[in-house]
Every structure is written in C-alpha cells, then in structure tokens.
C-alpha cells in the first residue's frame, strides 16, 4: 500500500499526538472478517425512506454521552459509500479523542 505525500503530511500531526499517549499495549486478540465468505453479508448500506430529510442526517452522527456513532449512514456527503464509512470513522475517532483529552471543554 502506498500513500501520497499529502496524506502522509496530513497524518503526521495526528501520529505525533497519539505518540504522546505512550507505547500501545500488546494486541491480545484479533478477528479477521472476509465479507465474501460470510453468508449473512450482502453488501448492504443504509436506506432512508422518502420521508427522511437529508438535513437530519447529522443527527445520526451526534454523540450521546460517551457513545459515538460512525458508519456510512452518518456521513453527510457520502451516505451509502465506503468514503462515508471512512470519513465518519475519522470524525468519530476525533470526537473520542477530544472527549477524552484533558483539555476537553465538553459538559
């Protein structure tokens, strides 16, 4: 896998901030999912009926206390696409980071 210079430049500040947390603990376990081998996965995505207002999609992404939401269904721009899942994961990670940081101003 290769990364463009702009991507590397964008991630450097995040990596530096994560290093401030110290050395990560060892991986205890992992589970590999091969979607093509799972009989229950059919490549679905969120479908909103005709009465759902797209302007309400941001409500699906709002944290509720210490519960954070991600997934293509919470993406304003890329609902239904992998781009939306990735973008929403980055957004939710940033929200978790902000919520747990010492300088957080959340109530």
Image (cartoon, grey):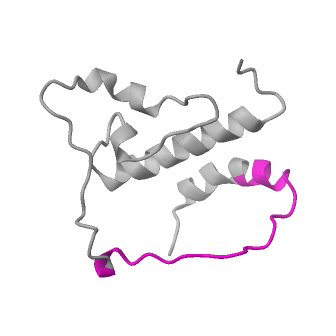
* Magenta-colored stretch includes residue 20: yes
In the visual, does 11 lie left or right of 88?
Answer: right
* Residue for point 61% across, 49% down: 10
Taking the view exactly as shown, the residue that stands out farthest to the top is 107
Which stretch appears magenta?
15-37
* Magenta-colored stretch includes residue 33: yes
Taking the view exactly as shown, the residue that stands out farthest to the front is 40
- How many numbered badges does the structure rendering display? 0
Quadrant of the image occupied by residue 54: top left
* Residue for point 72% across, 55% down: 15
Residue 89, percent from left and from top: 50, 48
* Residue for point 15% across, 24% down: 51
Quadrant of the image occupied by residue 101: top right
Residue 21, percent from left and from top: 84, 52
Q: Is 3 above or below relative to 60?
A: below
Q: Which of 3 and 52 is in front in this view?
A: 52
In the visual, does 30 lie left or right of 102?
Answer: left
Taking the view exactly as shown, the residue that stands out farthest to the bottom is 37
Q: Is 57 above or below relative to 32?
A: above
Q: Is 89 above or below relative to 98?
A: below
Residue 20, percent from left and from top: 85, 50
Q: On the rendered image, what quadrant is the C terminus found in?
A: top right
Residue 2, percent from left and from top: 51, 72
In the visual, does 42 lie left or right of 96?
Answer: left
Q: Which of 102 and 44 is in front in this view?
A: 44
Q: Which of 11 and 104 is in front in this view?
A: 104
Secondary structure of the magenta portion, mostly?
Answer: loop
């Amino acid at each position: 896998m290769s990364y463009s210079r702009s991507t590397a430049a964008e991630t450097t500040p995040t990596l530096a901030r994560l290093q401030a947390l110290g050395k990560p603990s060892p991986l205890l376990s992992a589970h590999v999912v091969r979607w093509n081998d799972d009989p229950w996965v059919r490549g679905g995505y969120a479908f909103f009926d005709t009465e759902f207002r797209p302007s309400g999609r941001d409500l699906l992404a709002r944290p509720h206390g210490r519960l954070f939401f991600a997934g293509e269904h919470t993406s304003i721009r890329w609902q239904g696409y992998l781009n939306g899942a990735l973008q929403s994961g980055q957004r939710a990670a940033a929200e978790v980071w902000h919520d747990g940081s010492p300088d957080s101003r959340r109530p």
